[in-house]
Amino acid sequence: MRYGRRGAFTEVVKGVVVKGSRLTLILAGLAALGPFSIDTYFPSFGAIGEHFGVSLLQVQGTLTYYLVAMALMMLLHGALSDSFGRRPVILVSLTVYTAAALGCALAPSFGLLLGFRMLQGVAAGAGIIVGRAIIRDRFEGSEAHKLMAQVTMLFGLAPAIAPVLGGYLHRFFGWQSVFVFLTLFGLVLLAACTFVLPETLAKEARTPFHPAPLARTYMSIFGSARFVALVLSLGFGFGGFLVYVASSSDFVLGVLGVSETGFAWLFVPIVIGLVGGSWLVNLTAGRVPADRTASYGYLLMFGGAAFNLVYTTFFTPQVPWAVLPIVFYTLGVSLQGPIITLYALDLFPKSRGLASSLQGFLQTMLFAGVSSLVVPLVIGSGFRYALAMIVMLTLNYLGWRYFHWAAPTAAHPAKVGSKVG
């Protein structure tokens, strides 16, 4: 579109910037709903167990149920928004989420708490899945990439803020206050989306919701061994530090021996690694070959994991040495993460949306598996945490090598920094 006067063009650009900034905050809030729902109540695990008379492992089940429900619903959020619009799916999911959070705060029994946590999981995943679609609806090329990067950077702060905030809420107001906060957070997002968030998918662009064709597409993607290998590789890579996140109450309060307000000792290093790695990827995109960047990531990951294992073998874990390896490990994960994600999505260039949903599903299910199966094996021992990190990293590397081995002569389908359709 051409403008007869330079001033008119300037006003349009300013309008896009303002709208983009406002949209960035809303989408970042929607994406942060998941981390806040997971991390904020970690400091309250012990108190929840005492309140309902259940064990710490049973309280851990509130996380597992949440993750399984979120993973399963992730398979439908994208398809539902393609058929009924982005805005209705967001508004309905936020309404359900807010009601479920209030239900958690008022739950009279542990069984009802589990049920409301599952309902939170059903609703919480819509923000990140549909949010990506909104960005692609409204922006193209570099503008879309910039907005996605801004959302990611803001989203990366949530894991550091949530447990610290949760620790203070728990200390001064009790464990129920954490879920009251999540209720208020949901209400704020619901109000912002109701009055500000536009519908970005035109009615003529929507597709009918037919479960059978969707199921066939899902199965064809699931049937790709290379796709599954890459997705599991990235999932296991993240699992190396997510085992600390899933059992942060034990690691921070028990292994490190700090107070409920000391969760920053774990989550700040994680965020430093994730945000720092994302910044390095943006800096080197198009300048350093993708596989070489991934190799640098593996050097950092193996170095951090090896130091972690040696340190916990000979010394009692304490800050800062017990969390320093986590910085290097997460830095390496965030270097390889965009590369693996692009390689996996570009295996199905005509179905990247569905492939993205399946990535989210498989990785969330993997996190649920870590929470329910791995955490009980590592609780109480810094050495076992370090050993779990090594095992997860090994599985990550095997998946990465299988992807290359399965197609040794094929050109890699994506490069970091390349335009993704």
Image: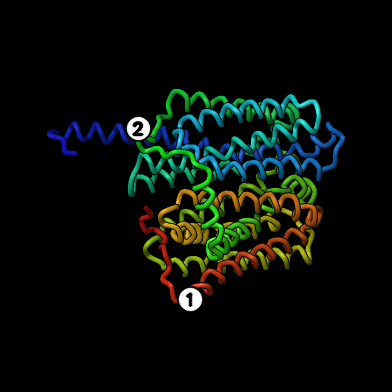
Residue, disc 1: 408
Tell me which label, 2 or 1, sits earlier in the chain. 2
Which is more toward the observer, 48 or 382? 48
Q: Where is residue 347 in the image (x, y as percent from the top left)?
A: 46, 61
Checking the image for residue 173, the label placed there is: none
Residue 261 falls in image quadrant = top right
Distance, label 2 to label 1, CA atoms, is: 47 Å
As helix, strand or loop, the secondary structure at mark 1 comes to loop
Amino acid found under the numbered disc labelled 1: Pro
Q: Where is residue 382 in the image (x, y as percent from the top left)?
A: 77, 58
Q: Where is residue 226 in the image (x, y as percent from the top left)?
A: 53, 65
Residue under the point 74% across and 24% down: 106
Residue 148 falls in image quadrant = top left
At label 1, counting other C-alpha atoms closer than 10 Å, the crowd grade (few under 14, some 14-19, many 20 or more) is: few
Amino acid found under the numbered disc labelled 2: Val
Residue 301 falls in image quadrant = bottom right
Residue under the point 37% across and 62% down: 286
In what quadrant of the picture does the N terminus appear? Answer: top left
Asked if one can make out residue 160 in the rendered structure from this viewpoint, the answer is no
Residue under the point 60% across and 44% down: 159
